[in-house]
Amino acid sequence: MIQVDIPGAIAAGQIFALLSKKYLKKEENIFTNRLTGPISLYFALFFAPVGMFLLIGWPAWESMYWWKWIEKPAFNPPVAFFYIAFNISMILLGTGSYFTGHALYRRGKEGTVKLLSVLSVIATLLPFILWPLTWYHIGTYNEFHAVPNETTTLFNTPSFFWSWLAVMGYFVVTSVIFGIWIKRFSGKIAE
């Protein structure tokens, strides 16, 4: 969901900065350090594609049923551009968050990196608290806003459920593996 993905990218960047703090505290080059490439690749190959997949397949759900226009990218350049901008923003926000963590470490503000990590995780979870069960309904904008609600549920929509499970599995597994890798690799190059 867009409202989750935006702070989620920031949270991921801060968490990866936390995992590689030993290296980042010593590294002077913020934008050209040895982890810039891997971080950018993570967001381009593992983070952003998950959101794009869900946005393309279930645009109303991905936007928490806020906008009807998001469902019609075909023959509609502004909406198609939004899809591209969303993908690019996930990469830039995540990488930029990591660079911000690095800059804060260089200034001796380790506590701020921890605080930003916690706040961005809270911001990622906040849409689920503010709009409970929105994620549970699968359908179009019109179906969601119909009275009575005409959407199906997550578990009663096999095309969505299995696709969501596969793409989230991909995201979780690759994120955990990348987190372990960045922790180990950054520790080795920090010595």
Image (cartoon, helix red, strand yellow):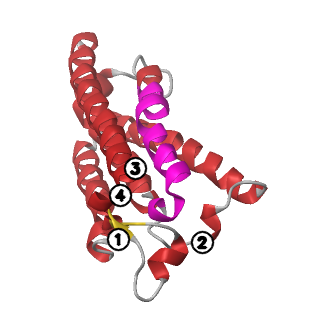
**Mark 4 closeness class: few <14, some 14–19, many ≥20 residues within 10 Å:** some
* Amino acid carrying mark 3 in the image: Ser
* Amino acid carrying mark 1 in the image: Thr
Residue wearing tag 2: 68
Q: Which of marks 2 and 3 is nearer the N terminus?
A: 2
Label 3: which secondary element: helix
Tag 3 near tag 4, CB within 8 Å: yes
Residue for point 24% across, 54% down: 115
Magenta segment boundaries in residue numbering:
39-62
Q: Quarter-wise, where is residue 38 in the image?
A: top left
Q: Which of marks 1 and 2 is nearer the N terminus?
A: 2
Label 1 to label 4, Cα distance in Å? Answer: 15 Å
Tag shown at residue 134: 1
Q: Is residue 7 something one can see in this rendering?
A: yes
Tag 3 near tag 1, CB within 8 Å: no
* Amino acid carrying mark 4 in the image: Thr
Given residues 24 and 1, the one toward you in this image is 1
The nearer-to-camera label among 1 and 4 is: 4
The answer to if 56 sits in the magenta stretch is yes
Label 3 to label 4, Cα distance in Å? Answer: 6 Å
Tag 2 near tag 3, CB within 8 Å: no
Q: Which of marks 3 and 1 is nearer the N terminus?
A: 1
The answer to if 52 sits in the magenta stretch is yes
Given residues 146 and 4, the one toward you in this image is 146
* Amino acid carrying mark 2 in the image: Lys
**Mark 1 closeness class: few <14, some 14–19, many ≥20 residues within 10 Å:** some
Percent across and percent down for residue 41 are 46, 25
Q: Earlier in the sequence, mark 4 or mark 2?
A: 2
Residue for point 53% across, 41% down: 92
